[in-house]
Image (tube, coloured by chain):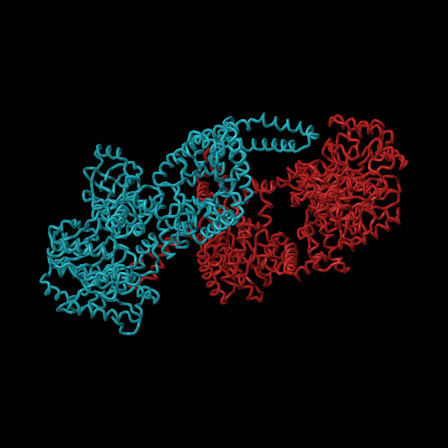
Chain colours: A red, B cyan
Amino acid sequence: MATTTGAKKWVFLFPEGNAQMRDTLGGKGAGLSEMTNAGLPVPPGFTITTDACRAFYTEGRQFPPGMWQQVLDAMQVVEKETGKKFGDPANPLLVSVRSGAKFSMPGMMDTVLNLGLNAETLHGLIKLTGNDRFAYDAYRRFIQMFGKIVLDIEGSKFEKIFDSYKERVGAKYDTDLTADDLKKIEVEYKELVRRETGREFPEDPYEQLRLSIQAVFASWMNKRAMDYRNFHKIPHDLGTAVNIVTMVFGNMGTDSGTGVAFTRDPATGEDKLYGEYLVNAQGEDVVAGIRTPQKIATMGNEMPGLYKELEQIAEKLERHYRDAQDMEFTIERGKLYMLQTRSAKRTAQAAVKIAVDMVRQGLISKEEALQRVEPNQIYQLLLPRFDPAAKTRAEKEGRLVAKGLNASPGAAMGKAIFDADKAEELGNAGQAVILTRPETNPDDVHGMLVARGILTARGGATSHAAVVARGLGKPCVAGCEALKVDMERRQFTVDGVTVREGDEISIDGSTGEVFVGAIPTIEPNLAEEKDLSQLLEWANEVKRLGVWANADYPRDAQNAVNFGAEGIGLCRTEHMFFEEDRLPVVRQMILAASEATILEEQLARVQEEYDKASPDSRAAIDKRLAEARGKVEGSESVRRYREALNTLEQTQKSDFKGIFKVMAGRPVVIRLLDPPLHEFLPSYEELLVETTELRMQGKTKELAEKEPLLRAVATMREANPMLGLRGCRLGIMFPAIYEMQVRAILTAAGELEAEGVPVHPEIMIPLVGHINELNIVRDSTQKAAAAVTEKLGRTVSYKFGTMIEIPRAALTADQIAETAEFFSFGTNDLTQTVFGFSRDDAEGKFLLQYVERGILPENPFQVLDRGGVGKLLRMGVEAGRKTRPDLKVGICGEHGGEPSSVEFCHQAGLNYVSCSPFRVPIARLAAAQAALAQVERDR
Amino acid sequence: MATTTGAKKWVFLFPEGNAQMRDTLGGKGAGLSEMTNAGLPVPPGFTITTDACRAFYTEGRQFPPGMWQQVLDAMQVVEKETGKKFGDPANPLLVSVRSGAKFSMPGMMDTVLNLGLNAETLHGLIKLTGNDRFAYDAYRRFIQMFGKIVLDIEGSKFEKIFDSYKERVGAKYDTDLTADDLKKIEVEYKELVRRETGREFPEDPYEQLRLSIQAVFASWMNKRAMDYRNFHKIPHDLGTAVNIVTMVFGNMGTDSGTGVAFTRDPATGEDKLYGEYLVNAQGEDVVAGIRTPQKIATMGNEMPGLYKELEQIAEKLERHYRDAQDMEFTIERGKLYMLQTRSAKRTAQAAVKIAVDMVRQGLISKEEALQRVEPNQIYQLLLPRFDPAAKTRAEKEGRLVAKGLNASPGAAMGKAIFDADKAEELGNAGQAVILTRPETNPDDVHGMLVARGILTARGGATSHAAVVARGLGKPCVAGCEALKVDMERRQFTVDGVTVREGDEISIDGSTGEVFVGAIPTIEPNLAEEKDLSQLLEWANEVKRLGVWANADYPRDAQNAVNFGAEGIGLCRTEHMFFEEDRLPVVRQMILAASEATILEEQLARVQEEYDKASPDSRAAIDKRLAEARGKVEGSESVRRYREALNTLEQTQKSDFKGIFKVMAGRPVVIRLLDPPLHEFLPSYEELLVETTELRMQGKTKELAEKEPLLRAVATMREANPMLGLRGCRLGIMFPAIYEMQVRAILTAAGELEAEGVPVHPEIMIPLVGHINELNIVRDSTQKAAAAVTEKLGRTVSYKFGTMIEIPRAALTADQIAETAEFFSFGTNDLTQTVFGFSRDDAEGKFLLQYVERGILPENPFQVLDRGGVGKLLRMGVEAGRKTRPDLKVGICGEHGGEPSSVEFCHQAGLNYVSCSPFRVPIARLAAAQAALAQVERDR
């Protein structure tokens, strides 16, 4: 369509667009255009572009120049095609006005249907359809929708009129209302509009159209749309397109209907038509989940011809788009219309199965399959499941009380909570919550975000609850109609059981089962996920990055191997220290460390002096040497220190043996002790209160016992422990601790090697900021290694490297690589120091607000900050490799399992990422996608 | 001298060397060579190089190949020149063996005199001199010195023999002893040597020589030498040269003597010969301060010819070296010998005066003068002086008890402490200490390092105490013979007063006065320091860097201007908050801030929604708007918050007015509130103890009053406050506080401008890490500025900039410079984040040890770390200027007043440094030196 004014083209008729124009036409508009051009039955219509929406905002909420004229011109074309006329009492054209952004935001923005109805066209509609009840109902719906969305009148006010009328006339269902009833409701509705807005309901269809387009534009910036975009990281400046589509009615009788269908099952990925439809209903009845629709298979029996047509269209669309589609259709008096198609949202399981199946079916390549699955989605497949034994027990105990729709997979247990606000509050406080609602709507999203799972009594697999839950990767059981939810009493009853708010329930979104009481969950098993395993094997074929795991115990290491980890990138020895039976020994070590170290260093200094002195002058030193030795040998601190170190050496040795065995020769990077020692001691504040109490009670004996500990803890307290005496600083101030750890590592390795078990230990030094620190620890490591060699009678080979987690280390990486054989970027601490954020404080006190307000695009502790941390990381890699071209570089912060960060690590030329075991599959896929993106770029 | 073996040349005869060969020959050797070649009377001798010393260490404490042969060859040349023979009983050559490193380390290493004496040569010496007492005394001294230094026998053991012999024979002075006495002492000494070493005292002169050279080499690595080098930042790998010099004797009668002379007064810089000499004495008698020598002027009367010769030599040396010299000389039977010359150590005052005088005398250029003064030395001139009134009072009260030598200027008060260990202990604990000793020796240096001042009863202006104190810039009164020091009782009596250890005393090193009790000190006045003012004017002519000051109050600003500051680079507004009368208001603000901000933001959000809404839909928002407004207006928190903010705005306004007035149009950079708010609240731990006590006492009413404060403080506590809610994060979370500050600044400026006072305010935002943070604060600053404009009816111009103190800010400086008109590097925090050091924790827990152990070359909080922090700073400057070529960049950490850091700032292209007012002169000189060094490099 040529523009009439020479102005910018704001409006595209469906035949003028195509699937590539998502940026301009939005997803829905592009899909309608594409379908129109593919010859599918789409009602005539046109799209107002996202450019127009953006212009609307920059022009102070005014239509941009020329747009309205283009809308009028397009309406004439539609009138011509349909043979109807907008506002014509004789043969009225009715249209829907629908939002449609580039990225699907289900239910987040507004739609107005049946637009073009007024007192006059209503009668035309009655005449044309011969169905006055239908026409009055359409008009009633239009006023309600327009009143709510365009005129900003609270929806509940319309509902109240409607419900109280129903009550007055004793109607149980909406369908019990007659045309006359609906006519009376219409009068009350219009009265409501007059009262609320001070004006008459607009009768002019073009005014209706103008106001509706404005309202859709405005809905882009409503709170729930903004919340949704914030959560899904969709930019706020994209704008929405507006689609004006000729109305077709699914509620014109039993030969009419409306539905939503997926070309493949979006929950399981099974390759067959999936979806729901409702006979004699309009589209919003399905989407809103108010009536529970029928499965689409039923349509095969009830309307076999149309079902066949739908199947053919589905196949055509899949071939056309080379992806599973989510279609909206309406049947008006036996004729099928396609109202929308878009790439189908799907569960992780479905995404994986569809991608793998499509490769097998020759529809897409392996590389495409790898790009079809969001790495983060995989996480859902690795969500906990019910412990089968516990579940069987629960079933035997009769605790399986209902079964709903398996709307989003995964098992969850938590307290049943009946409103989103309370769910948010408890969820933020760290409690497990199952948001339990009659149905959900967009206002509930904030509660869904923090809930462990969602349970609704009404709504189908495409209801709001189901769609949002799948998007969030949360378990959801929807449409569980057996639940009688009593919102006033905040409880539901089912199967004779009453669950009050706060009671524990368990749901399985993969099966739809609902249990009362808690059922423990277990970890999933990758080997059983055949499709996922296949996809990840393909990922291994294309990825360049190694994927390692962070694991502190043999069981973690086993998990990591099961998930495909190629090594352990971070084994935190301090986690072993925190175990209950070891903590007393660790505390003994810490409390004796200072005094013992001072005495031992004094002795070492005199000894050194003695060794260096000429034989003549040694006599003079003899006495001091004997004195210093006497002090060491007579010291209770030294005795306790050595005793504790010996005990810990033994336990650490067996820890390491367990891990080495599991890893069977794969590299294991062990980080020496990192946290400040006071972390292992009781809290200063608690001791302060305790001693104050003892003092006030005059319990002098107990006080005298407690006070030395208080003093010791007080001495070790730090103003900013994150930047204090920890990491290699500890290893330098208390060399015996690191030497003990090195001996434990190398003895474990050596003893296993002697048994023929391959081992590959790598010793990693934390918190290095200056090459001299690393060199000192290297020297004491070599000393300890030599002791092990002597004791075992065999040399254990190991690599020696460092964390890069302090900006200075990255800035001086060229020097540090002189000594370090490998780098591992500790991006958690690096993020803290590069931003000057203490994570403990920042997230609670301002960081989440920063993200919410868009001050930071992401939480940098989740997604690696490329502009700052990433820049420094790249500098460090480059400088390190300049010194040592074969320097092995990895990352072991939480970012190692986050797809965008993994992509960055690939781009920065890292050798591997290391993440928590459950994130290994995510990282493998992300690494493959990064490699594929690289190929694209290099092309 | 050609080497006989073709080996490396390890030995240089004096005529073979010159002044440029300090690296190889050490300072003393190079000086002796230079003097020899200048025709001055130097006893024949040679120098063993520092290379030989280094080789000695690398070869496992062995002489390097060929060295010993070269020594023997050189001895032959000396024998030829002197006509004497080493070990010849008839005409024995005696030599001294003296250390001599590149940098002077007075008294730190060892010297052996009279070498070549044994039973046989002793008799030759008697025959030659006809003075058996002299000869026996020389032999006795040699055995004692050799025994102590070469054979490592405790010196006190020799002294004990000597003193008890004196007692036995009733000798009061050493000179009371006869040749026979000395002969008997010799026997006892040799018996001691036999006992201690199990061997006879070595008789072979060449063995004596070999062992002595070894001992001097070894003394390079003795503890006090290493301590000295650590303190003075002299590298440990330079090594020392060894000088073998023909002995000349100042103790051959009253026509002999020895002395030390300076070409100008090293304390005041006055241009006349200064020094001391002792008739009939050997050099160590002067240096060790055992006998109190006579002023050199006396020599003009006693030996007028020799004095004249010395004056001529002094002038010649000054012209030759173009600097003031420190000369050692000996007169042997009426003949003057020069034993050493070196650049004279001098006080800051002398350094400045000498440099300025030499320019006036046409000896050196202004540029050279600027390079002659160590910037850090200037600090001494700006040391506190006694408050004249308090001093007068003290004098009237009879507290002026003695007067010694004014050995090193500056006034100090502190506890009299009698040994170095205790002084070190108390000094490190932050106590003011005056180290009070009969005399000091190199073993006392560790105590001198921490003392506020040094007081000795014996020794002259060139005694150990005096020389070291001047080097350290500490006040010193030396040779205060009126003091009767009783080391056993740890007290001294003087003028009838007994001062016990720990009693307070006050000394003035500029006048030599000693007071009992404390006398408060006051700040110096630059205007009165004419020479320094002159030098600093020259500095201003050549420096490129601006020198600004950190000042928080008008009085600081006035100081800054007096010291030549060109602006204020950092005005910390929080310091104003801490004042006693304001703290309650600040606390009121803080405790109300959270709730008030939430309510106000809620209202703002509804208001915004309302403002954006179409007129149609405003009605619906009206009610919520009224509600939100009602909440704000009814809130006690809001009321208290606003009240406190208003009060603070008024007080801050008058603070700023005071500063602007003083600065009279010079730039004033005001940093908005930076520290975490909880710093202004009572301590959590104290409140915890208090409430526990109240609880235990059952004081429920008091408890109920206290608990809300405890809870508030608990909520605001942070794990790592350094990295928490502070800086611009505060300004973003509590915008009203920053807006209040901006209004106070701009109102103050505007009101002054209206009065015709020029002002130049610059608003600086702390702790920015992301450009979005800065932009948000910029917006609210503009809003506040607009309010001021409206209120005052005039626009106040200001600059808007940011601290760069977070690594991410430096890394993204290109983006930040889009908004910031200036950068100020906060190198204190930048050092903390780049190193990952919390200064509060690090310095106490490991950092000082790091510096001591050489893990870090310097404390990076004192001297800017070029490798890490500096690298990042350079990146930030470069990136910032790329975006904004005229970006003004400064530094406002403590480094701004540290010479090496100032040099770096010059090199990095900064516009200015800002430091504490008293450091402004240092920074000016350092900036000039940096500019001159630049000119050198560019040449």
Q: Is residue A144 above or below residue A774?
A: above
Name the residue nearer the viewer: B60 or A412: B60
Tally the marks. 0
Q: Nearer the viewer, residue A549 or A250?
A: A250
**Nearer to us in this view, B180 or A327:** A327
* Horizontal and vertical percent position of residue A645: 48, 54
Is residue A90 visible in the rendered structure shown here?
Answer: yes
List x then y, in percent, for residue A76: 81, 41
* Residue B616 position within the rendered picture, expressed as x and y whole percent measured from the top left: 70, 30
Q: Is residue A797 above or below residue B555?
A: below
- Left or right? Give the position of A424 relative to A169: left
Looking at the picture, does residue A688 appear above or below residue B616? below
Looking at the image, is A40 positioned above or below residue B704? below
Residue B234, located in which quarter of the rendered image?
Answer: bottom left
Outermost residue, bottom side = B5
Res A913 seen here: no
Q: Farthest residue in the left direction?
A: B130
Q: Position of residue B209 (x, y in %)?
A: 23, 66
Quadrant for residue B160, please give it: bottom left
Looking at the rendered image, the quarter that the C terminus of chain A falls into is: bottom right
Give the left or right position of residue B257, taking residue B488 as reference.
Answer: left
Q: Quadrant of residue A87?
A: top right
Q: Residue at x 58, y 47 (%)?
A: A860
In front here: A694 or B692?
B692
User: Is A202 left or right of B562, judged from the image as shown?
Assistant: right
